[in-house]
Structures are given as C-alpha cells and as structure tokens.
Amino acid sequence: MSRLDSSPENPLPLRRISQALAEWIGRLGEVWVEGQVAQFVQRPGVPTCFLTLRDTDANLSIQVTCHRSVLQEPLAEGARVVLRARPDFYAERGTLSLRATEIRQVGLGEMLARIERLKKVLAAEGLFAAHRKLRLPFLPHTIGLITGRASAAERDVVENTRRRLPGAIFAIENTATQGNAAVSEMVAALHRLDAHPDVDLIVIARGGGSVEDLLPFSNEALLRAVSSLRTPVVSAIGHETDQPLLDLVADLAVSTPTDAAKRIVPDLQAELAHVAEFRTRLRASVHRRLDTEEQLIAGLPERLRQGVSRLISAGEDECERSVTRMRSRLANMLQLAEADNAQLLARVVSLSPQAVLNRGYAVLWNTDGALVRAASDVSADELLQVRVAQGEFGVTVAAYPVPTDSRL
C-alpha cells in the first residue's frame, strides 16, 4: 500500500482514510492472541458470540466475535484464552475488532508450565542470585506498603508492625492484587514508592488465595520492576504450597503479612530488654575490672620493690662485668705501651751522645762554653774541657805542627 498523499489544500475525505485503514489491517492476516475474557455474551438463537478480550498485564481490551461453532466449551468471565483471529476494521463506525476462528482455554496446568519456563529464564539472567539481594534497614524511616484497599493484609502488617514499634510510619499504596489491572497498578505503585525520599523499605502484601488469584505475583513485568528498584522489597504473600516468583526476586520473602511485621522492624520492648541486659553485663564487667585493678594496685609496692631489687642486682652484675672488662683492657694496653716504650728507649739510647762517647769519642768546649768543632776554634795554651764516656777533665792546647795527611 502506497503512502496517501494529502495537504491542507487537498485533504482526503474521512471515508478514504477509513478504507485505507481497513485495507492495511486486513493485510495482517490471522494472528494468535492471548488474553483474559472480561465479558462474554451469547444470545439465544443468534449464531454469533461476542466477548471482550482484555490484556493480562495492561489496561487494554478489544472486542472479539466468533461463530457459535468455534466454542468447544462455554467461556466464563475471567478465563484465560488463546485464540486465532483476523483483525477487522469497520470503516463505517471506525472500530477495530477481532474475528476469531479458533479459541482455546488456558488451563491451570498450562499456566503453571508458563510460570516454570519464566522461572528458568529469570534464574538464567541472575534475578534470583543472592548477591542481588539488598539488605533491609534495621530501623526503617518510612515503610512503603502495597496491598489491597481495606484488606486484612494491610491491617495485619500495619497493626502488628506498630505493636512491635509504636509510631512506625507507613506510605500505603492501595492497588488491585488480582485481576487484569493488578500488575500495572502494582508496578506504578512500586515506582512511586521507590522515588519517595523517605521510603527505605517496600512491602508487597496479600492474603492467601488460589493459584489463579496469585498469578499477578508471578508476572514478568512485576518481577523485573522489583529487581530494578533501589529500595529493598519484602514479599508477604499468604500463598499456599505454590510459591509465586515474587518470593524469589524480592530481597526477603515471608510466609504471611503478619510474619512481615516481625521481620521489617525490631520489637521495641525486646530491644529495651536487650539494652537493660547489656547495661547490667557492662556494669558487672566494669566492677570486675575495677576489682582486678584494685588487687593489682594493692600488690604494686611489693612488685615495685622486687622489680627495683632485680634491676639493682642486674646493674651490679653488669658493673662488675664492666670493671673486669675495663681492667683486662687496661692491662693489655699497659703491656702494649711498655713494649712500645722499651723499643723507643732502645732507639733513643742508640742515637744519644752518650752512645757516641761510649764508642771512644770525646766532646771539647772552651771556657766560654762553646763547643770545639774545628782546630781553628782553639789556640795554643788554651784551656779546654774534655768529656769522655766516663767523666770529664781539662787539657791545655799544645802548639805543634799537624801533619797534612794526618788521620784519626
């Protein structure tokens, strides 16, 4: 079908639009559709049956017509069906409907099988994993509660919670908990409570019911909405043996709304009793510690004396060992010094003038005390003083010729 050309100057008549819609919709052919019967009308003598088919998750419905022969068994309002139908657009009235050629009722077994398949898919995606579970606050500021209006579940949660914690604050969202509108209303309530700045815990509560009544709590849209929240969610569905999938996705699942009150808030009286018990235990512990410290202080002088005595004894022993080490060290040093002095003395003696005199040499000096170093330093008949190896004596210089090649 080509695009319809139109403009403000050349508008199309309404009948042309209706015909085009009918042609487009007619091209869809037959389709399989699932829904819930909201209304069923079968007039006596009329071969055509009329029913209203409603979406199970959204507030959406459409009219369906079928021949009486298509029905294998009578339909009841609320029944789930799968039908094969062709969409029809009635151009004269501008309405859309489905003309069914086959209708199958979905039994309880099929619904349970679908829930089991959905359970496997969500488990494979990790929506039931323990690491995704959020921790519940010990003392929630405001508790969000999603439940039916004026229901027993609401009374159980609110009254039992306030019995445990007087003054508990609730933000209550009353929604449908079964039927076609239940999922959409609960999902919208979840998002409102999750966006509430004071709500830090959400409880979804409902009393017991049949498997069909609890189907909304195994709906995929609701389960994915719960898994995406930043606020912890508690599932408090008073279910029978069959477990709704909400219990697996929620951060905490309890068996009844009454049990939820025991899990979401502490018991004030029990906590006060615990505080009193802890205070008594703490006081007893402090007294025991004081008694122990008192005993330690009483024995402190004696321990100090013993400690000081041990320190003094240890100091004396260390001083004695130090004195012994110092004496040994000094003796070694003295021995080394004596050996060095003996060697030095021997060297000094070997280099002293007395050693030269001992070899037969003599020292002369005149009366003025000047040493005689050369023959020209003396004159004839001059009195000189002579020192030899052993003693001194005087001599007079005699005048006599000195041989030129004289030798000592």
Image: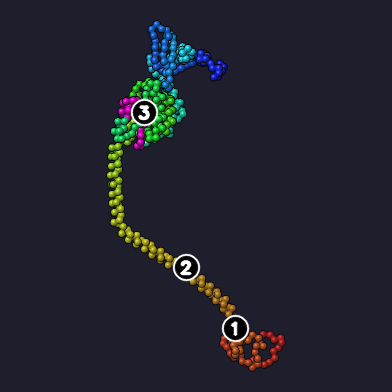
Res 329 label = 2
Is the residue 210 above or below the residue 299 in the image? above
Q: Who comes first in sequence, dot 2 or dot 1?
A: 2
Q: Are marks 3 and 2 in contact (CB under 8 Å)?
A: no
Quadrant in which residue 114 is drawn:
top left
Q: Which residue is mark 1?
A: 357
- For image coordinates 32% across by 28% down, the residue present is 154
Three-letter amino acid code at disc 3? Glu
Please, what secondary structure does the residue beneath circle 3 have?
Answer: strand
Residue nearer the viewer, 246 or 201: 201
Residue 402: image x %, image y %? Answer: 69, 89
Q: Who comes first in sequence, dot 3 or dot 1?
A: 3
Please, what secondary structure does the residue beneath circle 2 have?
Answer: helix
Which stretch did the figure color magenta?
Answer: 138-157
Quadrant in which residue 121 is drawn:
top left
Distance of mark 2 from mark 1, alpha carbons? Answer: 42 Å
Res 173 label = 3
Q: Can residue 371 be found in the magenta stretch?
A: no
Quadrant in which residue 138 is drawn:
top left
Residue nearer the viewer, 322 or 141: 141
Three-letter amino acid code at disc 2? Arg
Q: Are marks 2 and 1 in contact (CB under 8 Å)?
A: no
